Amino acid sequence: MKILITSLFFLSFNTFAQTAQEIIKKSDDARMPTGDLIFDVWVRDFKKRQLEKETRYKVWSKGTLMSLVDTVEPERQKGRKLLMINDDLWFITPDVKRPTRVSFQQRLTGEVSNGDLSRTNFSGDYNSTILSEEKFKGKDDVWVLKLEAARKGVTYSSIKYWVAKKGFLPLKAEFFAASGKLLKTAIYSKPLNILGAERMTSVLIQDAIQATNESIIHYSNHKREKIDESFFNKDSLAQ
Amino acid sequence: VKKSMRVFSIKTVLLSKSWLFVLAFLIGEVSANDQLETSKKKLKCNRGLLKVVTVGGVERYACVVGKKEKESLPELSPLNWQARWWGRFGLRPKGTPLIASNRYRAEGELDKGVAPWTKAVLGARITHDLMSNIQGDEFRDNYSRNGKPEFELWNAYLDFSRTNWRVRLGQQQVAWGEAFGFFYADIVNPKDLRERNLGKLADLRLPIPMASVQWSARSLNIQGIYVPFFRPDRMPTQPSDFFPESSSNFGLPPGIVLDTLQKHRIDDSQGDFGGRVSGTLGGVDMSVIYFNYIDRQAHYRPVSNFPIGNRFLLESHHNRVQSSGLTFSTELSGGVIVRSENVYTPKRKYNVMSMSGFSEDDYSQRVHVLGVDLPKWDKVQFSFQGSLDQLGGESDTLLRDKNVTIGSLMFRWDLPHDQEFFAIASVETKEMSSLIQSRYLYPISRHHEFETGVDLFSGKEDSFFGQVENASRIYIGLRGAFNG
């Protein structure tokens, strides 16, 4: 009984004393599992609410610092790849057969930047602070966090981030440029049990100025598979 | 709590593969920044095998000491295929008479796992060029492919890849360098220059038989290559519009046509070798290259001192050269990418007109390229590139200027509905000759896209780009791609 009470005390203390960085870390996990992973991504781009483009990718991810995003459809663009290793990103196209360095901020498709697909962890890239605790849409208890880029080259200069206290699920993010201008907003939805935990499987990204310009990213078919580090080699992948 | 968790975790591990392990203990939770964490944990787990186990929904590192798991053979990769076709209908508005130049191409590639860690790749393509004047009379003999379908075995190799090693044997492309639009540090494969540098670089880089061995760690790649057989660049021949109108340089009388024999003579034994060490350090991609090879580009010797008929015939010769170089690229603040290539090739032979007549001389070639890619502004992106190609030698060369400086501007615009427009304007600064390439792509379906564009050469008759002015064209085309 003593042990149980002590355990409960520590557990409850833990919940209330979450640091901002711990929240971000757990919320990262609620967006995407860590470890070796293969999954599919389906991106639909809408302009003025009209579907403009659909792209399907296959993603190989090793931890949070290595990933390969391979275009599967449309077939005329098959073979275009984005390779991320640590803080470096390359674009590989069959037209050139050579990796070309690109930035995380650069637009990949619709409202989606390269970094939105290739890099899914905020905890390693941003320093965070808790701004407030509130009810999201009058329903869920959330933390509102401010994330500041920990170094140059990350996708966004700062992020305002809403994370549900229940399950650390991300609910909303606002992405800002260095000037403080709001660039776009992301709404996370469709929590599903993926590889043993509840994780968000859909992200709606809206342009800050033209809210009718939006992209929906849908994640599916998550599989754990051992991926060798050497798989993420830009020279091998290009040739 | 910690103790009970540890006992539970050890039990979980032991129960899952009980015969395999002598002892397992946990050494920490898998963090989001787990690449770094992995290295730290590996230090702590120096006597065992570091594994990730899930305990109560939380991933944790377990150090497993005991009998190692036997590595199982990987499944063979399934058969994948790609098929592409392309039809282009072009018009050359600067020549007389107006010439229609059409190209039809079909290509395919298969790859399949044939043994553990090994896949076989087989690709081929067939190209048919049809030239006619605008009235529709066909010219069968005046184009690079002689009006006949040209079959080419493309990529055809065995690829063995395991842990840090990759060995590739067979007909393949090796691409080095950082530049766009032109080949500078990209020296390994010969190039199809029958239409100068028009087209995609991967289409112009001719696959050749070679052995390539690569060893790679996360940020380091070492590649060694051996090319057993010589294959030269493919150059335009008379009367292709891409054959340079530079016969005046040779002091030939009017009516005499300069031409080259298709036979290539090499002045050394065959067998090229070289390598590349590349890596990323502090956000900078760097590579050092070295290649010892029979020069893909020719210098020429006259077959006789007099024209044969109305042709002054030249024979192509190739000598051994060594190129070494350094390339780098990095991202500056704000998403600006800087790229550079620098290649040095001593003792490269170029033709000269000396007191004794048409001959050749050794030149040291230095090429420097600097490019800047600006960040995409909304859906528009600009890139700039400047190149300086210098020949160090005493006398003036015949077929090119000693110093060639080219400035290029690339513009790319992503239009709605996946349409794309891009243009490259290149200017050779000495004679101010230029090449403007632009292309607009309109997707028709998942598989097909329509294209239209121009390739416009302009400048003086003997200038770098102007000498092939008649090859300028406007075109429309249709492309298709299928995969399975």
Image: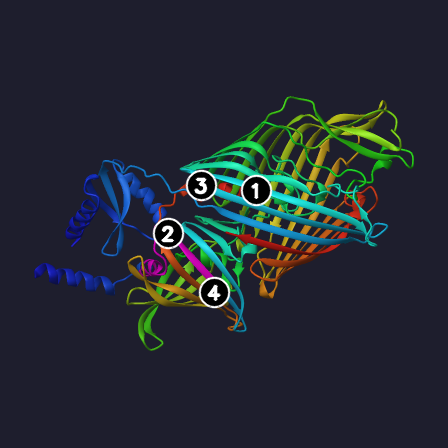
Q: Which mark is residue B429?
A: none
Q: Position of residue B4 (x, y in %)?
A: 15, 52
Residue that label 1 marks:
B123
Q: Which residues are magenta?
A: A23-44
Q: Position of residue B175 (x, y in %)?
A: 58, 40
Q: Nearer the viewer, residue A104 or B392?
A: A104
Kind of residue at disc 4? Phe
Q: Earlier in the sequence, mark 2 or mark 4?
A: 2
Viewed as shown, does residue B484 lie left or right of B434? left
Q: Is residue A231 above or below residue A155?
A: above
Kind of residue at disc 3? Gly
Q: Is residue B165 above or below residue A205?
A: above
Q: Which mark is residue B113?
A: 3
Cα–Cα span, label 3 and label 1: 15 Å
Kind of residue at disc 2? Leu
Residue A93, can we see it? no
Residue that label 2 marks:
A37
Classed neighbour count for the residue bearing mark 4: other residues with Cα under 10 Å, few (<14), some (14–19), many (≥20): many
